[in-house]
Image (cartoon, helix red, strand yellow):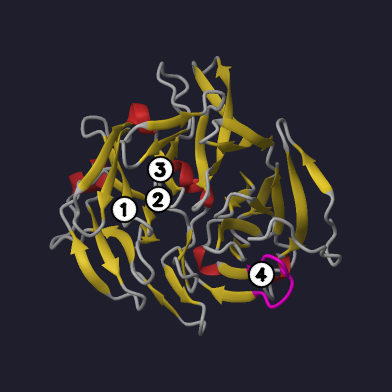
């Protein structure tokens, strides 16, 4: 991606504006209202939400998942915009089952994933072929990501020959899962069964063909025990890190040579506290730990670069419940090779009117460009592009 973009006079905010940041700044390039594209006839007056964002591998396009109801997957839409000319020829696709990137703090894969060639997009369980606009769907997909130019891996429930027992319905929090490798026609090629119930696919590196898997503690369901790096073809474990080292989610960076981790800071009431960190995949050693940042997830890593956007939380003591309440304090662009904060800011909140009139709020969603030079942030139907300064 170019380091500077041409002036876009059609937009409300133009080049030259900086968003204040605690360390460094974000240079706002443009802002665009996508409300009309996210909503449709009959939905007038409903505030559109932006659920997920994802840059193309070359950084020239941004995919945006939008929905007028945050928890109404049948209404979801996927928009694909050109970074330099975002108002020109916005491509739209009707899709279903789009989760929100706010769930990334739970370790799940990103809601939007591009193929390395930039011609395919996974959005939820939908695969979109950009060359002709055709789509196919992976049924029952829990998480999915590309492992090569035309292959993707998806995690799906392991179907049983018999229906679940009453005990399983009442007491089993996790169901057994399987990893399935699909082609660009959504046809399964290889099925990898026999995983424990508590395994979750966090991310995949198409450059290295590696999977980042999170495994729950068998004795304490709901608490993660370790992060595993697995070769997607040979199915061999390449590295293992305990949760003390790896936290609760993972994203690949720097062409698959590093994996960056963090958690959602819900463990503040415990003695243990994990800061975001990045790990060297080849040596297994820690590259850097962001000591001044609490939590880290949701996080986004530059696919080709050395920068990560992480979430920093504050805590207050809740006396009636005798525990800490966590609040998203700021987002931080962190350079993990230099181990320094580049910029930080407090994200806007987006609100939704759900079916039944119940209001809901979520921080604006975000993504970082593959080279780490740009950040996209969107909420309430408004998408903004920033250049990270310096």
Residue 174 shows up from this direction: no
Q: Mark 3 falls on what kind of element?
A: strand
Residue 341 shows up from this direction: yes
Mark 2 lies on residue: 256
**Which of disc 1 and disc 4 is earlier in sequence?**
4
For residue 270, above or below residue 215: above
**Which of disc 3 and disc 1 is earlier in sequence?**
1
Q: Position of residue 172 (x, y in %)?
A: 24, 43
Mark 4 lies on residue: 82
**Which of disc 4 and disc 3 is earlier in sequence?**
4
**Which of disc 2 and disc 1 is earlier in sequence?**
1
Q: Position of residue 267 (x, y in %)?
A: 44, 25
Quadrant where the C terminus lies?
A: top right
Q: Mark 1 falls on what kind of element?
A: strand
Label 2 crowd (10 A; few <14 / some 14-19 / many >=20): many
Mark 1 lies on residue: 210
Mark 3 lies on residue: 259
Q: Was residue 89 drawn as part of the magenta stretch in this picture?
A: yes
**Cα gap from disc 1 to disc 2, whole angstroms:** 8 Å
Viewer-proximal residue among 318 and 17: 17
Q: Mark 2 falls on what kind of element?
A: loop
Task: Tell me what residue is drawn at x 71 percent, y 65 percent.
Answer: 34
Residue 11 placement: quadrant:
bottom right
Label 3 crowd (10 A; few <14 / some 14-19 / many >=20): many
**Cα gap from disc 1 to disc 3, whole angstroms:** 10 Å
- Range of magenta residues: 81-90
Q: Position of residue 169 (x, y in %)?
A: 24, 48
Query: Are circles 1 and 2 on residues that touch, CB within 8 Å?
Result: yes
The nearer-to-camera label among 1 and 2 is 2
Label 1 crowd (10 A; few <14 / some 14-19 / many >=20): many
């Amino acid at each position: 991606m170019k380091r500077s973009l041409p002036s876009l006079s059609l937009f409300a905010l133009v080049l030259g504006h900086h968003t204040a940041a605690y360390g460094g700044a974000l240079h706002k390039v443009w802002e665009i209202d996508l409300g009309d594209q996210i909503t449709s006839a009959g939905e007038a007056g409903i505030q559109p939400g932006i659920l997920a964002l994802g840059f193309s591998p070359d950084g020239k396009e941004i995919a945006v998942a939008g929905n007028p109801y945050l928890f109404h997957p049948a209404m979801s839409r996927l928009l694909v915009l050109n970074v330099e000319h975002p108002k020109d020829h916005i491509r739209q696709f009707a899709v279903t089952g789009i989760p929100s990137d706010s769930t990334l703090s739970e370790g799940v894969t990103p809601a939007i994933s591009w193929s390395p060639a930039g011609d395919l997009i996974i959005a939820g369980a939908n695969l979109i072929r950009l060359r002709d606009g055709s789509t196919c769907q992976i049924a029952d997909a829990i998480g999915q990501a590309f492992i090569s130019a035309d292959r993707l891996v998806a995690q799906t429930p392991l179907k049983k020959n018999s229906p679940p027992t009453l005990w399983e319905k009442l007491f089993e929090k996790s169901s057994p899962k399987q990893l399935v490798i699909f082609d660009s026609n959504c046809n399964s090629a290889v099925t990898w069964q026999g995983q424990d119930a508590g395994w979750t696919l966090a991310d995949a590196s198409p450059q290295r063909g590696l999977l980042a898997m999170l495994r729950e503690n068998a004795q304490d369901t709901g608490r993660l025990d370790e992060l595993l790096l697995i070769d997607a073809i040979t199915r061999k474990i390449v590295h293992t890190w305990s949760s003390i080292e790896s936290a609760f989610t993972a994203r690949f960076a720097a062409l698959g040579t590093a994996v960056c981790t963090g958690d959602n800071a819900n463990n503040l009431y415990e003695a243990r506290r994990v800061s975001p960190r990045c790990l060297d995949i080849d040596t297994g050693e820690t590259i850097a730990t962001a000591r001044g940042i609490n939590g880290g997830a949701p996080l986004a890593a530059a696919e080709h670069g050395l920068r990560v956007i992480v979430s920093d939380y504050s805590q207050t003591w809740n006396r009636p419940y005798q525990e800490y309440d966590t609040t998203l304090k700021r987002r931080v662009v962190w350079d993990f090779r230099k181990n320094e904060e580049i910029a930080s800011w407090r994200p806007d909140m987006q609100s939704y009117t759900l079916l039944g009139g119940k209001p809901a709020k979520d921080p604006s969603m975000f993504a970082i460009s593959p080279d780490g030079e740009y950040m996209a942030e969107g909420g309430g139907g408004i998408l903004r592009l920033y250049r990270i300064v310096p």
